[in-house]
Amino acid sequence: MKLPGDAVIARTKVANYLLKWQPENDKSQFLALAGYTARHADQLVEDIRTQLLPLEATFEETTEYGDKHRISGALTGPNGQLLRVISVWITESASRVTKFITLYPAKED
């Protein structure tokens, strides 16, 4: 299935979580491999929207907040490096709005 093209991707989540070093489950160093830094928050939001969101989503589970989906794909960063990622999304039960939750490196097979 395809998720809606107008899904919400919060810039603050990208800038303050994905691109900011975290003591646990840090993703900033992984994203930096493709040239994404704190200065590239808007670029990462746009790349998630244009490179991942159009891909097929897989239903994962229904939670108390809504239906979770994942999209496996690749992001080509500002430096041209390709990153294989899994992105996680939720369609909220109450609002029916689809929102980006996170992304993480895809495991190599």
Image (cartoon, rainbow, N blue to C red):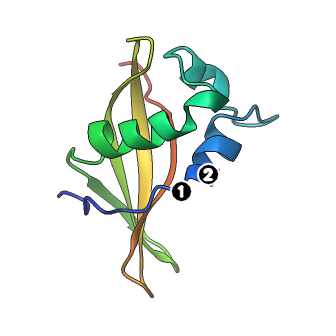
Indicate left or right for 48 with 17 as reference: left
Indicate left or right for 18 with 89 as reference: right
Q: Nearer the viewer, residue 49 or 92?
A: 49
Indicate left or right for 94 with 52 as reference: right
Q: Nearer the viewer, residue 96 or 60?
A: 96
**Callouts 1 and 2 close, C-beta under 8 Å:** yes
Using the image, tell me which numbered label, if any, was put on residue 77.
none
Identify which residue is drawn at 56% across, 37% down: 41
Report the Cα–Cα distance between label 1 and label 2.
5 Å
The quadrant holding residue 108 is top left
Identify which residue is drawn at 53% across, 56% down: 10
- Residue on which disc 2 sits: 13
Q: Dot 2 lies on which element?
A: helix
Q: Dot 1 lies on which element?
A: loop
Asked if residue 68 is positioned above or below residue 64 in the image, the reply reads above
- Going by the numbered disc 2, the residue's amino acid type is Lys
How far from the left and from the top, in percent, is residue 25?
A: 69, 36
Q: Nearer the viewer, residue 9 or 29?
A: 9
How far from the left and from the top, in percent, is residue 100?
A: 46, 56
Q: Farthest residue in the bottom direction? A: 94
How far from the left and from the top, in percent, is residue 62?
A: 41, 73
- Going by the numbered disc 1, the residue's amino acid type is Ala
For mark 2, does the 10 Å Cα neighbourhood hold few (<14), some (14 to 19), or many (20 or more) residues?
some
Q: Nearer the viewer, residue 28 or 45?
A: 45
Identify which residue is drawn at 19% across, 57% down: 2
In which quadrant of the rendered image does the C terminus lie? top left
Using the image, tell me which numbered label, if any, was put on residue 10.
1
Indicate left or right for 30 with 92 as reference: right
How far from the left and from the top, in percent, is residue 16?
A: 70, 45
